[in-house]
Image (tube, rainbow, N blue to C red):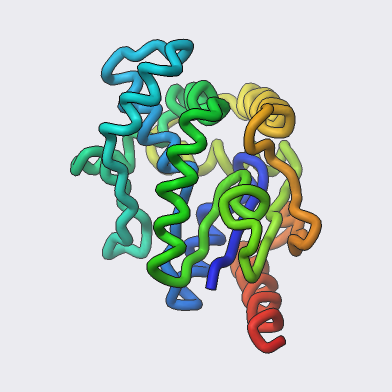
Amino acid sequence: MIIAVDGPAGAGKSTIARLLAAALGFLYVDTGAMYRAFTLKALRERVDFSDVPALAVLARRTAISLCPSGAGDLKVLLDGSDVSAQIRTPELTNAVFNVAQLPEIRAIMVEWQREYGKRQSLVMEGRDIGTVVFPQAEVKIYLDASAQIRARRRVAQLAAKGIGVDEAQTVREIEARDEKDFTRAVGPLRRAADAFYLDSSSLTIPQVVDTLLAHVNAQRSK
């Protein structure tokens, strides 16, 4: 069974999808982490984001693995090295769109993502899971929240890691990222026609998880 979770940056997709997968005993796959890991490699190897052929060659010789950790989180391995912390910095967050918008890179990533779905039941989250990667997914969820709430969550998340950022600036960055995600030519962020929509702005994490579990179980019983 495949559960696709889409939505804008900071809507809580990673947290919710991880908890949902744990409750169901499914694999959790964070596709954003894959794009982030590849962006990190491109930055490390100083490949220009405008050099698409070079980026495609780099992607083909890159190994990205997502492994459940003992803490219930996801360990992101880039060519065998754990980069889980390095891919969550504000600088990398602002750079990832440069590769995520490229059709050549998205095609490679989609190949990798679909391989996960061939092996086991999973909860996969991203921007185009229910529309592009797995349009046939048994359950599609679109998780949303206001830009202000998403910024507040991002600031708190980074603060917990010792990274201080300005909330007003974070709101502006999220709104700019939304505009790019909604309007990019390939794999734009949009709600699938048959997706279950949930605005989490005023909900707690347990409330969101309980609501989605009820929806998944209702779909499974059909």
- Counting the numbered discs, the total is 0
Q: Residue furthest bottom?
A: 221
- In the displayed structure, 122 sits above or below 158; it is below
Does residue 171 appear in the picture of this structure?
no
The residue positioned 67% from the left and 50% from the top of the image is: 131
- In the displayed structure, 122 sits above or below 94; it is below
The residue positioned 49% from the left and 77% from the top of the image is: 24
Quadrant (top left/top right/bottom left/bottom right) for the C terminus: bottom right
- Residue 15 position, x and y percent, is 52, 57
Give the left or right position of residue 219, taking residue 20 as reference.
Answer: right
Give the left or right position of residue 161, taking residue 144 as reference.
Answer: left
The one of 189 and 207 positioned closer to us in this rendering: 189
Q: Residue furthest right?
A: 193
Give the left or right position of residue 118, taking residue 63 as reference.
Answer: right
- Residue 160 position, x and y percent, is 43, 43
- Residue 74 position, x and y percent, is 36, 55
- In the displayed structure, 94 sits above or below 107; it is above
The one of 43 and 52 positioned closer to us in this rendering: 52
- Residue 7 position, x and y percent, is 66, 48
Does residue 134 appear in the picture of this structure?
yes
The residue positioned 42% from the left and 34% from the top of the image is: 36
The residue positioned 45% from the left and 17% from the top of the image is: 52
- In the displayed structure, 5 sits above or below 94; it is below
